[in-house]
Image (cartoon, grey):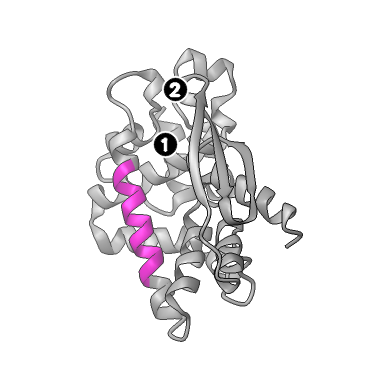
Amino acid sequence: MNEALVRLEEALGYVFINRSILATALTHRSLGVDNNERLEYLGDALIGFIIAETLYQQYPEASEGELTRLRATLVKGDTLARIARRLQLGNYLMLGSGELKSGGWRRTSILANTLEAIIGAIYLDAGFETCRSKTLALFSDVIHETTPDTLVKDPKTRLQEYLQSRQQHLPEYNVILERGEAHARIFTVECVIPDLNIAVQADGRNKRSAEQMAAQLALAQLNV
């Protein structure tokens, strides 16, 4: 395992003082109590702040809405998993037998969460400035390619702006069904626009993605 951690440190561009914290960051909850969930929580907050601060400084003319959408694009699970795949994190994950059999090492949510845990681990191991530096290095490519000019508004934002421009009431989003195992939940969300007699449903692996899919269906009904 030590050789594997050394290879990962080379990919990260950071050598841990306390390598055991890196091992914890790579341990999925399916393997036991001593897992990476707490580090994931910490890393999520750190990434959100570091990216928000960077965007604030980089785009002084951007509105709050633009900055919020930029940050959401950069810290969403798909983006985190893309960086994790570049680091080949799947090769280093420690998973329980169930996750191993189901291919958890390639699952977007697990890869994204592990990257967050690693950022949290770097912070605890070396402090904020090193964490900021390494986070920005990892996100460098996606930060440079995601700008206000290239930003595509998400379906929920587009639907809200469409309705506001026509002085209509905003849509209501309600979770009407949850199903599946705890590690692979599926949410069914309904998007209702009473003024326009529209009610659509969509599924997603979390509430946010289900709401976005439902908003997209509503936009399709509106031909927007």
Quadrant housing residue 88: top right
> Residue 12: horizontal and vertical position, in percent?
45, 50
In magenta, the rendered stretch is 41-53
Quadrant in the rendering for residue 108: top right
Compute the Cα span from label 1 to label 2: 29 Å
The kind of residue on which mark 1 rests is Leu
Closest to the observer: 64 or 55?
64
Residue type of the residue flagged with mark 2: Ala
Q: Position of residue 61 (x, y in %)?
A: 46, 86
Determine which residue is flagged by label 2. Answer: 182
Quadrant where the N terminus sits is top left
Query: Of marks 1 and 2, which one's residue comes earlier in the chain?
Result: 1
**In this view, 10 is above or below 25:** below
Name the quarter where the C terminus is drawn: bottom right
Residue 44 painted magenta: yes
Disc number placed over residue 51 in the picture, else none: none
**Horizontal placement of 218 versus 39: left or right?**
right
User: What residue is pinned by disc 1?
Assistant: 5
Considering the numbered disc 2 on the image, is that residue within a helix, a strand or a loop? Answer: helix
